[in-house]
Image (cartoon, helix red, strand yellow):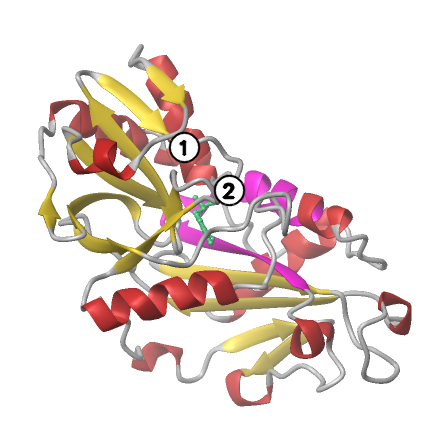
Amino acid sequence: MLQQFDPRNKDIQVYVKDGLYPRDEATVSVFDSSVQGGDAVWEGLRVYKEGIFVFDRHLDRLFDSAHALWFQGVPSRDKVKEAVFQTLRANQMYSDTHIRLTLTRGEKITSGMDPRLNQAGCCLIVLAEWKPPVYDNSGIRVITSTIRRNNPAFLDSKIHHNNLLNNIQAKLQANVAGVDAGLMLDHNGFAAELNGTNIFMIKKGKLLTPFADACLPGITRGLVMELALELTIPIEERNISLTELYTADLVFATGTMGELTPILEIDGRKIKRETELFERIEKAFFAKRQEYCEAIPTVE
Ligand code: PMP
């Protein structure tokens, strides 16, 4: 499922630092921390006709990540929200849109690793594009990657940072294997997540997902766990081995990029599709859209 260039995105306006710029002029400095060290945090958000999906939860994670990395000169929540609204209004994007929201540590006075070289505050980027969900609901095929997902001993996966090389390497392996995503294990060999989405399995009426020790605690993952409680579906976070995934009644991925997506095949093994429970969760998930969306204010 390789994304294609959408000609509607040719002339988009992108917010960088303090205002909007046409796509070709929307750039960061070569001294920016994202260029120098991948020193940035980010969020991927979706805009539906009802508004921006779980906007505040994404902002909470963005600010938590920036705080953990001790960014200075972080813009206020109101400023970030206004920048997002402004960008959407400028592009007339009120549905079918994906927003890549990035906050870098900002520009350095000279190249180097030391965060004390960052004296200009953070750089906020709001990149909104016309984009359908990357995975459609028909399902994906995955392989297990040899690249392990970070745990807090190395780089805490609770920080949603731009050091994505581990995940990119897993995706490279998936590309070579001709499948959609790489399944990443933790350092003990248990499933952590896919290279860009979280993972759940269903077995005998129970929903299971790996501990959030070596995976991003995804917002979609959190919503699914809340829905399971509402629907009184037993749910457990625990270590999950590959064999358990191969023999599950259904396995699915969750994330902003694909919402809820069944996993049809792992390492060549066809995964069962006993869909009754999955369909209940999926239905409840879509039924919540209105409640979870924040409307985009019209011009003051
Ligand atoms: N895992 C990884 C590695 C991700 O990058 C993402 C999304 N950026 C997710 C899972 C899914 O998280 P969310 O549900 O918050 O989109």
Q: Nearer the viewer, residue 19 or 127?
A: 127
| Residue 92 visible somewhere in the drawing | no
Residue range in magenta is 40-63
Q: Which mark is residue 93?
A: none
* Residue at numbered disc 1: 210
> Residue visible at 30% across and 43% down?
253
Percent of width and height locating residue 190: 38, 38
Residue at 42% across / 60% down in the picture? 98
Amino acid at dot 2: Ala
Q: Is residue 201 left or right of residue 187?
A: left
What residue sits right under mark 2 in the picture?
Answer: 214
Kind of element beneath mark 2? loop
- Based on the displayed image, in which of its 4 quarters is residue 202 positioned? top left
Picture quadrant where residue 116 is located: bottom right
Q: Are marks 2 and 1 in contact (CB under 8 Å)?
A: yes
Q: Is residue 294 magenta?
A: no
Residue, x 31% and y 80% (percent of image)? 5
Left or right: residue 83 versus residue 107 is: left
The image position of residue 185, as x and y in percent, is: 39, 46
Q: At numbered mark 1, what does the secondary structure look like: helix, strand or loop?
A: loop
* Mark 2 → mark 1, Cα distance in angstroms: 9 Å
